[in-house]
Amino acid sequence: MDHKKALEKIKKCLRLAASSNPHEAAAAMRQARALMEKYQVGETDVLMADVQEVAARSGSKVNPTQWEANLAGTVARAYSCRIVFIAGPGNWSFVGEMAEVAGYAMTLLLRQVRQARRDYITTKLKRCKTASKTKRADMFCDAWVWEVRKKVREFAGNQEPSAAVEAYMQKHHQDLQAGSAVDRNAKTGTNSARAFNDAMNGTLAAQGVQLNHGVGGAEQLALT
């Protein structure tokens, strides 16, 4: 029996240990403890057994844009996950019991906002200089993300990460370093009529994003 199968068997025994039948509960607890000793499984390992770590590709390998970081944070909070940006491969790593759904949501949402950005540049910003075009497209994306944020939270909720997630982070990500996202509009006025127009267009573009529960009652995300 490998470590993963042992964990599953231990979890099953611990569930049986909560039985109202005292003899069954005691036997299940003895078996759980025996398995934990045999396979060197600690209480923390059992606690973390349902926690997953799932990656979603970023648009940057080193420093993501601020609007993308805001989107990743929104998805992480909605699915009760912690999030880590892995520089080098350029991945958002979601940690939690619903990490798989969070990673899926991030991938689809990021794909949609990038397409909306390309469409906006092509139709509204094609005559702009490159630097101005990038900043204005970022303003558009920032508004897009904030509009979608409300829909994601309504769909998925906003529970805090569990103790198991925190334990996982302590074990696997205890040496995290603070990073910074790229905000190309940090030194640019955002109160201009042009900035307002870019933000309004971003908000309008995001209104077509629909979030629905998956088929068969599965807690999955579908975007159209």
Image (cartoon, rainbow, N blue to C red):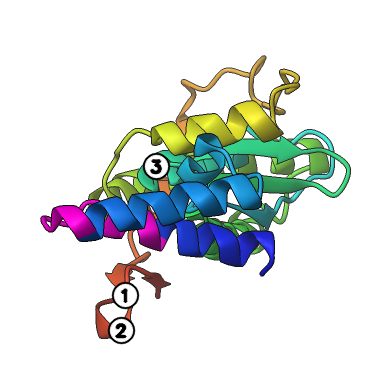
User: SS class of the residue under badge 2?
Assistant: helix
- Residue at image point 71% right, 18% down: 178
Q: Which residue is mark 1?
A: 218
Instruction: Reply yes or no: does residue 30 show up in magenta.
Output: no
Q: Quadrant of residue 63?
A: top right
Q: Which residue is mark 3?
A: 80
Going by the numbered disc 2, the residue's amino acid type is Val
Q: Which residue is mark 2?
A: 215
Question: Quick check: 167 above or below 24?
Answer: above
Going by the numbered disc 1, the residue's amino acid type is Ala
The percent position of residue 95, horizontal first and vertical second, equals 56, 44
Residue at mark 2 to residue at mark 1: CA–CA distance: 6 Å
The percent position of residue 34, horizontal first and vertical second, equals 52, 51
- Residue at image point 85% right, 49% down: 89
Q: Residues within 10 Å of mark 2 (few under 14, many from 20)?
A: few
- Circles 2 and 1 in contact, beta carbons < 8 Å: yes
Residue 145 or residue 43, whichever sits in front: 43
Question: Quick check: 132 above or below 145?
Answer: above
Q: Earlier in the sequence, mark 3 or mark 2?
A: 3
- Residue at image point 57% right, 38% down: 42
Q: In the image, which residues are magenta?
A: 12-23
Q: Earlier in the sequence, mark 3 or mark 1?
A: 3
